[in-house]
Image: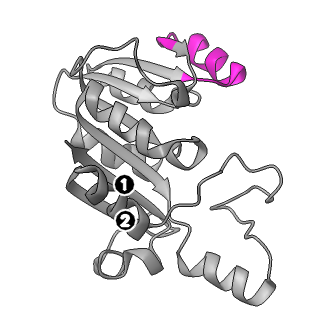
């Protein structure tokens, strides 16, 4: 199980209605559905949509950059977006829509300011390619490189409250070091937020 999925699982209240933005192959929805939650996913990739359907999951083909007008205000208990924020064109608008539809939200994203990225850029002079970021600069789905500090500033600018934050390193561990120096040592940041 992915560490961000495990953390998110612990943050979802019992019997919740969950909307998963950019749900990928539906792994998180499958996990949450097994816990008794009602889940719907939004996805744009035909291959991922097919994977969700094969798992018996509810999925809608939808471009997140076009908004969530097909969902009523506060119609979901939790709206989740894992490893997707950096791939949308308008992250600020998507965050506001996420919190319009959900009573709470969870956002997980790769921290592009961690020391491994800095080292790679500083000493190799090239965009990092690793297990953490397995794409070359020309084929990456990431269009907005975000750091822990960038995300927290965006939340302040948008009037979003950070309820909880967990930052993990490449091994998936959260400890006093990753929490003390999240922008430098964190590989993935997971936030529980509300408006």
In the rendered image, residue 51, in percent from the top left (x then y), is placed at 63, 20
In the rendered image, residue 10, in percent from the top left (x then y), is placed at 24, 43
122 or 90, which is in the foreground? 90
Can residue 1 be seen here? The reply is no
Residue beneath the point at 58% across and 41% down: 89
Q: Secondary structure at mark 2?
A: strand
Quadrant housing the C terminus: top left
In the rendered image, residue 138, in percent from the top left (x then y), is placed at 83, 54
Q: What number of labels is visible?
A: 2
Q: Which residue is mark 1?
A: 190
How much space separates mark 1 and mark 2, taking CA atoms? 6 Å
Residue 110 is one of the magenta-drawn residues: no
Residues marked 1 and 2 touching at CB (< 8 Å): yes
Whether residue 191 is situated above or below residue 100 in the rendered picture: below
Whether residue 173 is situated above or below residue 80 in the rendered picture: below
Q: Which residue is mark 2?
A: 167
In the rendered image, residue 162, in percent from the top left (x then y), is placed at 22, 55
Residue range of the region highlighted in magenta in the rendering:
43-59
């Amino acid at each position: 199980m992915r560490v961000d999925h495990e953390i998110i699982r612990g943050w979802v209240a019992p019997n919740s209605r969950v909307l998963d933005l950019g749900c990928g192959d539906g792994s998180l929805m499958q996990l949450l559905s097994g816990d008794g939650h009602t889940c719907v996913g939004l996805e744009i990739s035909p291959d991922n949509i097919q994977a969700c359907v094969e798992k018996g999951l509810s999925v809608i083909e939808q471009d997140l950059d076009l908004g969530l007008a097909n969902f009523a205000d506060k119609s979901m208990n939790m709206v989740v977006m894992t490893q997707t924020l950096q791939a949308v064109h308008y992250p600020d608008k998507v965050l506001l829509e996420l919190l319009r539809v959900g009573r709470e939200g969870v956002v997980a994203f790769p921290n592009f300011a961690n020391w491994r990225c800095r080292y790679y850029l500083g000493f190799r002079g090239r965009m990092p390619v690793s297990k953490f970021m397995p794409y070359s600069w020309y084929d990456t789905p990431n269009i907005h490189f975000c750091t822990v500090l960038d995300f927290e500033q965006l939340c302040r600018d948008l009037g979003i409250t950070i309820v909880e934050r967990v930052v993990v390193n490449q091994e998936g561990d959260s400890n006093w070091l990753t929490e003390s120096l999240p922008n430098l040592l964190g590989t993935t940041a997971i936030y529980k937020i509300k408006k």
